[in-house]
Image: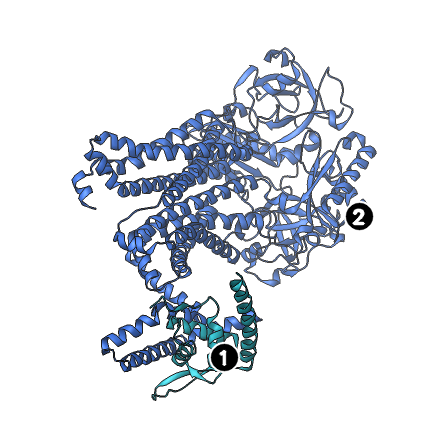
Chain colours: A blue, B cyan
Amino acid sequence: MARLSWFIRRLRGLRRAEAIHDEIDEEMRFHIDMRAGENLRLGMPPDEARRAALKSFGNVGRVKEIAYDIRGGGVMETLLQDLRYGARMLLKNPGFTLIAVLTLALGIGANTAIFSVVYGVLLKALPYPEPDRLVAIHGSSNKTPRMAVAYPDYLDWRARQSTFTDLSARMPAGGVLTGSEPERVTGRLVSASFFRTLGVQPHVGRTFTEAEDRPGAERVMVLSYSLWQRRSGGDEGLIGNAIEYNGESWTVVGVMPAGFDFYGQSNLNNEFFIPLGQLANQEYMRDRKSHTVMVTGRLKPGVTIEQARAEIQSLALQLGEQYPTSNYGKSAVVRSFSDDYVGEVRPALLMISVAVALVLLIACANVTNLMLARAAGRRKEIALRVALGAGRGRVIRQLLTEAVLLSTAGALIGILLAAWGNDLLVRYYPDGLPRLEEIGIDLPVLGFTTLITVMAVILFGLAPALRASKVNLHEVLKEGGRRSSGVMGGRLRNALVIAEVALSVMLLLGAGLLLKSFRQVMQVESGFDSRNVLTMRLRLPDAKYREASQSVAFLQDLMRRVTALPGVQNVSVATGFPLGRGSENGYWVEGEPEPQQHEQWASSVTQSVSEGYFETLGIALLSGRNFTALDTADSPPVVVVDEGFVRRHCPDGRLESALGKRLRFGGPSEPWREVVGVVRHVRHYGLEEEGRAGIYRPWLQINPKWFADFTRAMDLIVKTSVDPEGFIGPIRKEVQAIDKDQPLANVATLEEILSRSVAPRRFSLHLLELFALIALLLGAVGLYGVIAYSVSERTHEIGIRMALGARRVDMLRMVIGQGLKLAAVGIGIGLIGAIALTRSIKSLLFGVSATDPAIFAAVVILLLSVALAACYVPARRATKVDPMVALRYE
Amino acid sequence: MAKHKADLLQGTLDMLILKALSVGPMHGFGVGQRIAQMAENLLTVEEGSLYPALYRLEEHGWITSEWGTSENNRRARFYKLTAAGRKQLRVEEETWQRLVLAISKVMQTA
């Protein structure tokens, strides 16, 4: 309250400022006139009388200022005055101002842009009520840290648990909306509890009832807002009407609100929702070994995530005892929704945040140096102000005001930069950055910007202001404005340059390590050839392709037609391809102990492929034979294995030893399959993951139980002799020649897929490179500034030395030596800091140690050369000093 | 000249102003004159420093001010002791007396 009234008084003071000034002036004038009159009366001549009156009054300006501060309004008034004065000073020196503002804008802008991403992705609360009560539940086993959950397991968990208000399950769904305009859509099969668990209400209509979440119930569908807009222009009349999906009629019962998204991908897999429970009779939904659904839960109020984890894990254990063949050794992972959401991008984002903060520190150090140099040049002006009655506090305030002006200008430009950078970041951030829509320059982000701006002022404004205000009047005025920096000023500047160099070293090292990691990833032996390969998915609607033979006929016809296209070298259909789909299947090799429990099955990536698969993808056949057209449903079952399989099952390590072995996928209902060939190992899960073993079987030999399901969603893989992009149109034409309603999905070249798989790595690499470059530039400018300044200060000394016979080369050596010494100390400190810091980015490194000597050496050499270049120009200037001029200059 | 005059002791100016004003309202110049007169010109007071002190005392609520007309018909700001100011003056006088007594005793000790 007291504060408030003080403030109001000051504000009112501001309005009355002129009046108060006038009053004080009048009072002082009255006093001095009275004294002069008195002096006159005592017989002084008029001139003398006035002079004596002024003298006995003391420092008029100072008194007025102090008086004004006391009389109220002083703070605000002087602030305005400082601002005006500061702006004038900054405009008087446009070069300095421009460099300082741009440097700050760069630092503040980069930080704002990165923070907007970090905030949107990592910090902002998820868009559901009480998001911290939401958890994701994954299955797990010794072999797989995280996997989907078997639907019966989910049902048992849900029935037996007590720590959740509810659990929900979901599966991806995708198909074709037919009708006026056929369109491929991706959505989800969700349990009725899905929406309740998240706590979201539909925009119009309703979500599913438990009764609809069962086999045989009415087919109902909830649409996303955007799909609703697209299909009906937002007509509520669509509710209750049917929509044609995969050749069947589904009744639309509700529409989700605009912007409803799940796992941050509003368009992917969130276009429509249908009840998961309607599939409950399907074979794979009843099999506890088919891990098909993803589970989300909402904790009861007051329940901790640890309690929930303990409960779910003990339920998993119970199921393991109850169903040992399928559930032995299975457990569960329970983690908070937000961790699950953004888990993978966190380390990269944190690293980038640290990098960009270092850039800001360097920027501030640079501006500090500029301010120090300028303050030294302004000593006379400041001394004059002090002489005219400004207190030390007043001078500090003035200089800080200038710092505030600088950083505010920097922040404003920085925000523009950030808005632009933000666009770039969002546009170029690889797929899979969650919550993309929530990233933007919003209020909290601006708050952050303000915070770092204030921080910047303190960082770069305070030290120069404190130093500059400590003037010795007599000395400065006597010196007549000759520059001379105290030892202290020089020491502070040196420390700042050392810090800049050290920070640059850290950034460059981080960038270097990531660069080398990227190289290593790209040079990894992938096992396949991605050049000129086009891939696409064919999802054949169940309603139309009820029998497997229909799908097979379609695909075989298509392969024949595509092979005939000019420029096509090889064609294959498969259940997946490297970096694409693939499933881990358990198998048992004949002659090895029979696995008793789920855990004991060996597992491999298993693909079912047509002949020509290995040629199409350039996967080398190392031994035995390839699949042929003769490997059909009626011929003896065969498989081709890879080197990983040989390593695992052939103790002698010879490829030939694998040939003739027999293996079985699962129980007695599965046939024994003979190994007929060995191919090169393929990194199926991405270049950075070695993977273990791969097994391939002819697609026509898929177990008849699953055959129809598999063949309704096969990938077509085409190897062409030239750029494969041009083949999309002709292939689509061939597809539609067979079935005019059949769309193509997931059309992409293998190069694109490969590049997308390393996109996050490339992205953080580019960002870090950019920041390291900025750091290097700023560091070089800082070093240059300090050396140039010190040369100009030492002109006199250099002149004397040269007059005494020092050669130019000595001067060159002296100045460069001074710079290199600073750089060397900075590099040393930077290396120590980097060793501490790079350990924390270990998870982002690939095939390179955090202390890779080559990178360290390269960074040291780079920085030393940059330092050399930065010192060379001022050093040259030192050699050009004419002793006569330098000495006379005094 | 400086040899005959004593510099004002730190912190005593406020008390002198209150004392000067205890005889009645006067303007700033008058306060200065009054102090000089009371001190029989043995004190140097930088006249400018009167004003910050006057404003401070006003902030404390020990004196009030208003514009009036001076003896030579000019507009001047007149200061007046408040009740609180009178009390403050008494407190300071007592403190001062004790201080002077104590210091004199020390100084008179052989």
Q: Which SS class for mark 2?
A: loop
Most foreground residue, A388 or A436: A388
Residue placed under numbered mark 2 in the picture: A162
Q: Residue A430 at x, y = what percent?
A: 50, 41
**Which disc number belongs to residue B82?**
none
Judge whether residue B56 can be spotted in this image: no
Nearer the camera: disc 1 or disc 2? 1
Q: Of residues A455 and A788, which is closer to you in this image? A: A788
Residue A566 is left or right of residue A92, and the answer is: right
> Measuring 53% from the left and 34% from the top, which residue is drawn there?
A836
What residue is drawn where x is 40% and y is 44%?
Answer: A492
Left/right of residue A187 with respect to residue A571 in the rendered view? right
Query: Where residue A475 sits in the image (x, y, percent)?
Result: 30, 52
Task: State the quadrant of the N terminus of chain A.
Answer: bottom right
Which chain is home to disc 2? A
Eyeballing the image, is A635 above or below A426?
A: above
**Is A136 on the left or on the right of A727, as rendered?**
right
Within the image, what quadrant is residue A145 found in? top right
Amino acid on which the number 1 mark rests in the picture: Ile
Q: Is disc 1 placed on a helix, strand or loop? A: strand
**Structural crowding at the residue carrying mark 2, measured as other residues with C-alpha within 10 Å and reported as few (<14), some (14–19) or many (≥20):** some
Q: Amino acid at mark 2?
A: Ser
**Residue bearing the label numbered 1:** B63
Q: Nearer the viewer, residue A758 or A717?
A: A758
